[in-house]
Image (cartoon, helix red, strand yellow):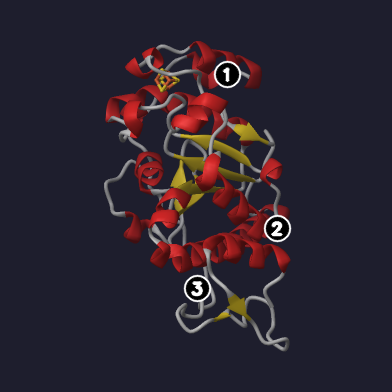
Amino acid sequence: MVDARQAAYLQALGVDVYVPRSSPPWEAGIAAEADVPAVPAAPAPPPVVATHAPAAALQPDIVANLDWEQLRAAVAACQRCELHATRTQTVFGVGNPRARWMFIGEAPGAEEDKQGEPFVGRAGQLLTSMIRALGLRREDVFIANVLKCRPPDNRDPRPSEAVSCRGFLERQVALVNPTLIIAVGRIAAQNLLATETPIAKLRGKVHSFGAQAWPVVVTYHPAYLLRSPGEKRKSWQDLLHARQLFSRLEQESASGGRS
Ligand code: SF4
């Protein structure tokens, strides 16, 4: 049965749902109205596909040894790439520094640059709904971006900018040490996984990021979902997949299978 938070997420996606009262949770799928096909149950998580970033993309400097406040200060003062010249402020990230879930997007937009927080505005509201659909509050997770400064006119990050900023993200992930990372959108996924593979081929698999091979799954960016309603159903599948994988990883961790 679709519970209140899942219904809220689907409502935010613009999907009206009807589920028979006798339907079991998750296995029942979602009987949607005529113009929206039912969402199938999430497939069993496949084995982890190691997709490590090349060593050359990493920053061999002191960032890897900074604590949380030192890292925050280093980002705020950073002038490693040209984006420092046009930013209003850096956008470090927000949320629980010991979160089990980490959401990583592309870069701050205009509103994020103004407010200093990632994923605000309509896309941010939709991301918050997606987080709630997982049974979490926004403050339970940690949200960050590949880039900490806004690219002018919301252009895509340049490879050199992503490389310059990568050490900060790697240190953030190491400090949070999440059970699972959700790469939000094509740009974030391709940067995290150091690949040019299309997002459609990255979804539905389990990748890994960084020195400790943190598990990563990929879904669409909420801004894209707002523009492309036809893809909303797939993002729901991604969340079901992520939740199933998260439960498995937590169980493995509890039984000593993963540190
Ligand atoms: S985008 Fe990253 S590397 Fe570039 S100036 Fe901002 S914090 Fe520094």
Q: Quadrant of residue 65?
A: top right
User: Label 3's element?
Assistant: loop
Residue 135 disc label: 2
Left or right of residue 28, residue 14 in this image:
left
Q: Residue at x 59, y 55 (%)?
A: 130
User: Label 1's element?
Assistant: helix
Image quarter in which the N terminus is found: bottom right
- Picture coordinates of residue 111 (x, y %)? 50, 32
Left or right of residue 105, residue 240 in this image:
right
Residue type of the residue flagged with mark 1: Leu
- Contact between marks 3 and 1 (CB within 8 A): the answer is no
Residue situated in front as seen by the camera: 252 or 240: 240
- Picture coordinates of residue 227 (x, y %)? 39, 55
User: Label 2's element?
Assistant: loop
Label whose residue precedes the other's in the sequence (2 or 1): 1
Residue situated in front as seen by the camera: 138 or 60: 138
- Picture coordinates of residue 150 (x, y %)? 41, 26
Label whose residue precedes the other's in the sequence (3 or 1): 3
Local packing at callout 2 (Cα closer than 10 Å; few below 14, some 14-19, many 20+) is some
Q: Residue at x 58, y 79 (%)?
A: 30
Image quarter in which the C terminus is found: top right
Q: Which residue is mark 3?
A: 43
- The Cα atoms of the two marked residues, 2 and 1, are separated by 30 Å
- The Cα atoms of the two marked residues, 3 and 2, are separated by 20 Å
Residue type of the residue flagged with mark 3: Pro
Label whose residue precedes the other's in the sequence (3 or 2): 3
Q: Which residue is mark 1?
A: 71
**Residue 92 visible in the current orientation:** no
Total marks placed? 3
Local packing at callout 1 (Cα closer than 10 Å; few below 14, some 14-19, many 20+) is many
